[in-house]
Image (cartoon, rainbow, N blue to C red):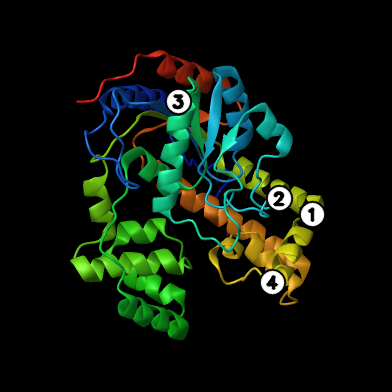
């Protein structure tokens, strides 16, 4: 059942103005910790780099808004979409095309073959390097994407956690094979409701990791992440969220997926499968790709796959909104009418002098 069309998903624009003021206060407090450089720790610097973030659920129009803002601000874009990093996944990820990437330089797009997994620690290392390189040339930085966890660790560092326990993981994967991934998700909800709310019911990797951390440390991974949250602030940041009323967002998602199919998504998936891409691995388990791959393999009709993909994309957007709504640093603007407001906020943010590190 679809939610009522008038349901609010994000703070009203009046409420967002309060959040803007709070975000401005937070940016002045986001000072670098003086720590050694490593893939998961900030590098030493004389002043904290200012980084703008554009976030929001899938289908809300982040890419178009970011392009328009980057051109006006003189900024370059760092991708924080966990699937746009893969070569060959173009149409179904709404990856910016060549013309857009010539207009505004994009970083961390098409950097991995589809069989080369990119974990969050590696993303963090690459993103920090890209931000440093852009800033060294005197350009402004906009980080854009809907992968909330990527955005969070880039702003606040990563909780590395205990090393993986292979035997424990095998036990949990066996439980998932016997009872279904949803069974493990229910077990997670019993011990870590916050993580269960953010992690998809079929996201086996993240469910297993969250349960693994709990079993190894006796504490939920969400508690570890919260205690770490402000331990390693490398950048001064302003995060702008794009808001859209639920019915319009869902209409946009449905329309966009139809356009993807018209542009050749089925052929894109067919090429990936013929190249030997494993439909069970994370890239092809992506919403949209997973359903179309099932149709290409003859497991369901194409029409059914398209409708399932639309439904699952709407559910993904709902989960993303849940994640972003819990973030007190986001200043929300209307996705369709708030571009000028976003530009004003980001212009003022980038115009402030950098804050020196301690």
Q: Which residue is mark 1?
A: 264
Q: In the rendered structure, which disc, 1 or 2, sits on the residue that comes first in sequence?
A: 2
Report if residue 357 is visible in the image. yes
State the residue in front, 213 or 162: 162
Q: Are marks 1 and 3 in contact (CB under 8 Å)?
A: no
The quadrant in which residue 294 appears is: bottom right
Q: Which residue is mark 2?
A: 91
Residue mark closest to the camera, 4 vs 2: 2
Q: Position of residue 180 (x, y in %)?
A: 46, 79
Q: Position of residue 150 (x, y in %)?
A: 43, 47
Disc marking residue 135: 3
Give me the C-alpha separation between circle 1 and circle 2: 7 Å
Give me the C-alpha separation between circle 1 and circle 4: 16 Å
Give me the C-alpha separation between circle 2 and circle 3: 30 Å
State the residue in front, 130 or 15: 130
Q: In the rendered structure, which disc, 1 or 4, sits on the residue that comes first in sequence?
A: 1
Q: Are marks 1 and 2 in contact (CB under 8 Å)?
A: yes
């Amino acid at each position: 059942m679809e939610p009522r069309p008038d349901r609010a998903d994000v703070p009203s624009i009046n409420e967002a103005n309060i959040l803007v003021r709070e975000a401005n206060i937070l940016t002045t407090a986001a000072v670098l910790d003086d720590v050694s450089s490593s893939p998961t720790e900030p590098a030493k610097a004389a002043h904290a780099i200012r980084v703008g973030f554009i976030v929001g659920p899938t289908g809300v129009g982040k890419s178009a808004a970011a392009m328009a803002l980057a051109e006006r601000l003189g900024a370059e874009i760092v991708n924080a979409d966990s699937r746009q990093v893969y070569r060959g996944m173009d149409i179904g990820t709404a990856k910016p095309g060549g013309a857009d990437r010539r207009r505004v330089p994009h970083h961390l797009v098409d950097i991995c073959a589809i069989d080369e997994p990119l974990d969050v620690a590696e993303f963090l290392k690459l993103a920090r390097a890209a931000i440093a390189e852009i800033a060294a040339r005197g350009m402004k930085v906009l980080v854009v994407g809907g992968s909330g966890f990527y955005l969070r660790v880039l702003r606040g560092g990563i909780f590395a956690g205990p090393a993986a326990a292979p035997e424990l993981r095998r036990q949990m994967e066996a439980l998932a094979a016997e009872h279904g991934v949803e069974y493990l998700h229910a077990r997670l909800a019993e011990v870590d409701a916050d993580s269960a709310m953010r992690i998809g019911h079929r996201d086996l990797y993240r469910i297993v990791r969250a349960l693994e951390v709990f079993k190894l440390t006796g504490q939920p991974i969400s508690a570890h992440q919260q205690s770490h949250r402000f331990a390693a602030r490398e950048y001064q940041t302003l995060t702008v969220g794009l808001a859209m009323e639920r019915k319009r967002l869902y209409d946009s998602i449905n329309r966009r997926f139809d356009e993807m199919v018209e542009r050749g998504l089925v052929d894109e998936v067919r090429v990936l499968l013929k190249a030997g891409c494993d439909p069970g691995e994370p890239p092809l388990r992506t919403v949209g790709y997973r359903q179309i791959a099932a149709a290409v393999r003859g497991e369901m009709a194409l029409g059914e796959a398209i409708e399932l993909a639309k439904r699952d994309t709407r559910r993904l957007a709902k989960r993303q909104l849940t994640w972003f709504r819990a973030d007190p640093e986001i200043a929300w603007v209307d996705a369709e009418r708030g571009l000028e407001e976003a530009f004003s906020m980001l212009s003022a943010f980038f115009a402030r002098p950098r804050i020196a590190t301690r």
